[in-house]
Amino acid sequence: MASIYRSKKWLKAVGQIECCVLCGHYGTQVAHRNEDKGMGLKVDDSLTAALCQHCHHEIDNGNKLSRIERRQLMDRAIVLTLRELTRGGLIEPS
């Protein structure tokens, strides 16, 4: 099994996105994808999204969406975060 990708630089870049990539609300948290983890381990840092506290809670713990819908929403948030990172010049593809 490959090692888990960890990057403080990546997390800092995601944390610099000021508005939630899903709802546009000001103030974000770096949210990891909630899958394939256990015993306090998180997935790769590259699978993160800039979410407001409300959207983060709804994806991780909310009961308004099914598990599949929450995962699909997080996948969308990760893609939108990648777009914001590149458009904002927070990361540059090599």
Image (tube, rainbow, N blue to C red):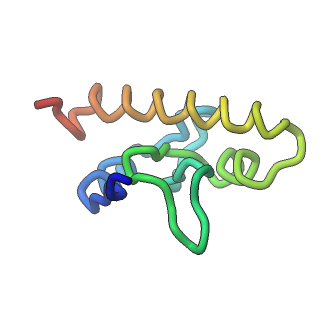
Residue ranking furthest to the right? 64
Q: Position of residue 7 (x, y in %)?
A: 27, 58
Vertically, is 84 above or below 42?
above
Q: Quadrant of residue 69?
A: top right
Residue ranking furthest to the front? 1
Vertically, is 14 above or below 40?
above
Left or right? Give the position of 11 relative to 48. Answer: left
Residue ranking furthest to the bottom? 39
Please give the name of the residue rendered at 47% of the width and 28% of the height, measured from the top-left corner. Answer: 80
Q: Position of residue 87 (x, y in %)?
A: 29, 25
Left or right? Give the position of 89 relative to 84. Answer: left
How many marks on residues?
A: 0
Q: Position of residue 82 (x, y in %)?
A: 37, 32
Q: Position of residue 28 (x, y in %)?
A: 52, 51
Please give the name of the residue rendered at 36% of the width and 57% of the height, measured from the top-left corner. Answer: 4
Q: Nearer the viewer, residue 37 or 18?
A: 37
Please give the name of the residue rendered at 50% of the width and 41% of the height, measured from the top-left corner. Answer: 19
Vertically, is 67 above or below 4?
above
Q: Quadrant of the C terminus?
A: top left
Please give the name of the residue rendered at 63% of the width and 33% of the height, measured from the top-left corner. Answer: 23
